[in-house]
Image (cartoon, rainbow, N blue to C red):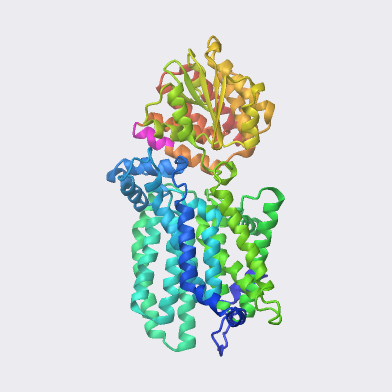
Amino acid sequence: MIRGRVVSSLHMQFRPIKTNMDIATTGISNVHRKYPRLVGLLSPTLVLAGIFLLGLALRLNCLNCYSLWYDEVASVETAQRGIDAIFTYRFGWLGNQTPLHYLLVLLTAQVVDPTVSATFVRLPSAIAGALTSLLVYGLGRELFGKAQGLLGALLVALSMTFLDYSQDLRPYAMFTMLTSLSVYCLLVAVRSQDLRWWLAFTLATIANMYNSYVVVTTVLPPLILTLFWLTLKLRRDKGEPRIAFLYAGISLLTIGLAAVPLLLDMLRVPRAFIDIGRWSLVEAVSLLVVIANWYTEFGLGGQLATIASTLMLVLALYGVYSAVRGGQNRGAAICGLFLLVPLLTMSVLMTSNFVTLRYVLFGLPFYALLVSHALISFTTLGSAKGSVIKFVPALVVVLVFALGAYNYTTLDNIDSVPSRADFRAATQYISESAGPEDVIVFADNHSRGLTVSNFYWHGNPPSPVYDARDPRLATHQRKGSIYWVVSRLSPLWLEALSTPEQGWADALPFLDGVVLREDSARANTTMLESLERMVEKNEAISPDHGFTRTLRGCVYQAKGDVPKAVSAYRAANTNSNPILGGEYLKTASGFEIRGDIVEAWREAAISKTLYPASAEIHRWMAEQLEKEGYVVESRIEARIADNLEEVDLSK
């Protein structure tokens, strides 16, 4: 119902509003009369400056406290291959980002080696995240009023979700800032009809597109709709069609021409066509709830987190209602456009492509503004009596957001940075402890730790390194200790895995992971026997998890038991991600073509982890094993691929 109201507001006839006073004027006027000195001290400029400094401090705090994670390492490694590679060395997931992103990473990586300090390569995201608060104030002032803008800016500055991406060496904080800048420039340009603002809007939009391909599919649709609607509305209300249409037309033409190279570049990378038959309205609505909950993560955990996010969603919906009721249809409609249109695009694309929530991070400021509008509207309800009490809901929400920011900055809380295992610490420990006769095995749930650790080793680990899903592991002739590197499992699982009862010679915990050492006293056992013991210990904790079942399949495969291996891989496939698994297989094939076999195997291991029952990945491994002289292992792998293909054909 709310969605229909927002969309219909794009077409409704607006009646002239006699006054431009926003919905918060009454409450603020009451406070101004009672506390004139306080209001004088808390001028919008000073408050906004304080919010910006707070947001900047939160983002600069501990910017180098943890290692780069897999996606960040991918950006750095791609960038460090040089200018030529940035434009020609992109395939699979390497083609998901624009050359501009890699060029920016290359520039910042020149200051300090990213393996020594991540501060400078993450700095652009931190600055962009802090600047977004200023732009949110501008958006709020244009759409609703100063009070909503200030409160929205504060919520964005404290947002746990946005803090995470503001300390991430990826383009998402930047494209959130550029989206806010683009919309703000458009609003001012339409209002003022100043050519300079139209130019700023055009440049901001082009910069946004060249910062991330995601902008073309998720940001441009609502942005173009907003431009057309505002221009048409200006023609009707002010009778200035010529200049408005001229500026809008020039801007659209320029943006369109700038998008052509990006579109051609996107076509070079294989993409799955959308399958509209798989689209579901129910799933789209479910996705809306998921995104809303993700926008309002506070690190509370359990039912409390669900309750808090649900209340924020209710506030956002009430923000739409109160805006429409108060005659601020434009603000409600624009916020709705930047939340609902990308949601629709995402729900269609995900029918056959891999999408992730961060692709719609730019909607968070608009969500925060709707929540802010609801909270400010409470201050105008009823009589002037109890005006201080009416600010209590806003205070409570700010405190909840502040709690989320605190939870995020508490680095000993693993859940505060769920995507970032501290492989820098693990790598340092192993480098100081392991020797040439030892072996390092990554049993990482997403299998990405091997790549990150290699980044910190500079490709020179102290011992032979394998992934637990690598068929070559069982052939390794063990002589010394085994260092099992495990991460991306639940904290309770990691804790149970490292207890004394498990019998490890040593267990070193690090952020979101653990290094388990199997003593060299057992060096007389084979690598296969050690792998099976590792699997049994995981099965004692969680026998039905896809991670455990995949490892069990690897054991059966090493023993040559093809039927049981196929069955285990099929069972592990319940938690699979076929689309992303296929993306990593494309990347593995790209590295293989270029002769980077070590990197090809790493990407192939990730593909197998994400989609263990894929006949394609097993076929790729069979061919690669044959090239490397693993004849027996290649035949077993080929038989597994054949069996998986037969199962697929029987559906």
* Residue at the (40%, 51%) spot, across then down: 123
Using the image as rendered, state which of residue 310 and residue 244 is in the foreground: 310
Q: Magenta residues: mostly which secondary structure?
A: helix
Question: Quick check: can you spot residue 341?
Answer: no
* Residue at the (40%, 46%) spot, across then down: 119
Using the image as rendered, state which of residue 637 and residue 414 is in the foreground: 414
Queried whether the magenta region covers residue 594, the answer comes back as yes
Q: Residue furthest top?
A: 524
Queried whether the magenta region covers residue 374, the answer comes back as no
Using the image as rendered, state which of residue 565 and residue 648 is in the foreground: 565
Residue 300 x, y percent position in the rendering: 65, 50
Residue 426 x, y percent position in the rendering: 48, 31
Question: Quick check: can you spot residue 608?
Answer: yes
Q: Quadrant of the N terminus?
A: bottom right
Q: Residue furthest front?
A: 37
Q: Quadrant of the C terminus?
A: top right
Where residue 115 sits, quadrant-wise, is top left
In the displayed structure, would residue 363 be above or below residue 385? above
Number of dots carrying numbers: 0
Q: Which residues are magenta?
A: 588-595
* Residue at the (62%, 29%) spot, across then down: 548
Residue 106 x, y percent position in the rendering: 32, 46
Residue 230 x, y percent position in the rendering: 48, 78
In the displayed structure, would residue 66 be above or below residue 523? below
